[in-house]
Amino acid sequence: MAAELAVPAEDGRPPAPSRTARTARTSAKGEQTRARLIAAARTLLAGEGFARFSTRNVAALCGISHGMCHYHFQDRSALIVAVVEDIGPEWIGPMEAAVDRPGSFTERAERVIALLTQPEGPDLSRLHSALHWFALNDERVRAAVEGEYRRWRECFVRLFQVLADEQAGAFDPVPPATALAAAADGLAALQSLDSRVDPEATVRILVTGLAEAAVRRP
């Protein structure tokens, strides 16, 4: 369909915006409001966890009406699911890039080790903890969190698949990948409590040990 044209008024005034332009501006403003709500939700979850988290408090932090919050998100669960989706690119995206860039297993493993040894920021750590709590009490949030962690584990499956291919398909990449994902999650929690942990040595032992065990396994 052809775009609508803004026809100049007979008195020489600037033409009124076309319906298409008005719709585009409204849509952009709506997306901005939605993004602000998600950012405010993240701030509340990272700062106070689940104690004061509600759509009303998120709207207040944003400086918009409670009704406007519910215009964009049906309820609290929908807003939390949006937060789960919003943080994915921050912690899963870099790992996907590290694994999927060309290279041998050793080269990709080095990139993975470098990422796993970076400490998780306190805000993201608290945010993950709050999301886990909600996942235990809300089926929709649980499904969203499970989906993101499935995507996280799949990174390690693809990593060990490279090693399996180099070994002519000698083993199933899923078990070592699952073990590495679980160990990495546990290490992140341990690092947040004990700064004396040497993450690089720990992760390197994990990756090399799992790789050697997978290759040896009949």
Image (cartoon, rainbow, N blue to C red):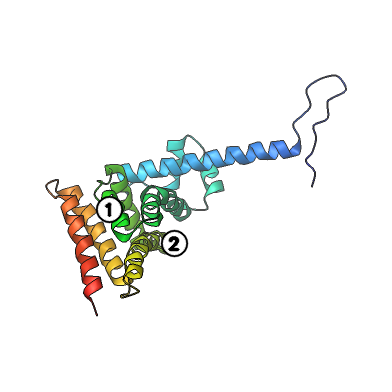
Q: Amino acid at mark 2?
A: Arg
x then y, percent, for residue 161: 35, 67
**Mark with earlier residue (1, 2):** 1
User: Please, is residue 11 above or below residue 162 in the view?
Assistant: above
Q: Which residue is mark 1?
A: 110
* Helix, strand or loop status at disc 2: helix
The mark lying in front, picked from 1 and 2, is: 1
Q: Give x and y (percent) for residue 48.
A: 31, 44
Judged from the image, the secondary structure of the residue bearing numbered disc 1 is: helix
Q: Position of residue 163 (x, y in %)?
A: 31, 66
Give the position of the C terminus as an image quadrant. bottom left
Q: Identify residue for label 2.
A: 140
Q: Is residue 57 visible?
A: no
Looking at the image, which residue is at 28% across and 48% down?
A: 125
Residue at position x 43%, y 60% from top? 144
Q: Pick out the residue farthest to the right.
A: 10
Question: Toward the viewer: 65 or 40?
Answer: 40
Q: How many marks?
A: 2
Q: Which mark is residue 17?
A: none
Question: Could you tell me which residue is drawn at 20 percent across and 48 percent down?
Answer: 192
Of 44 and 35, nearer the camera is 35
Outermost residue on the left side: it is 196
Image-quadrant location for residue 103: bottom left
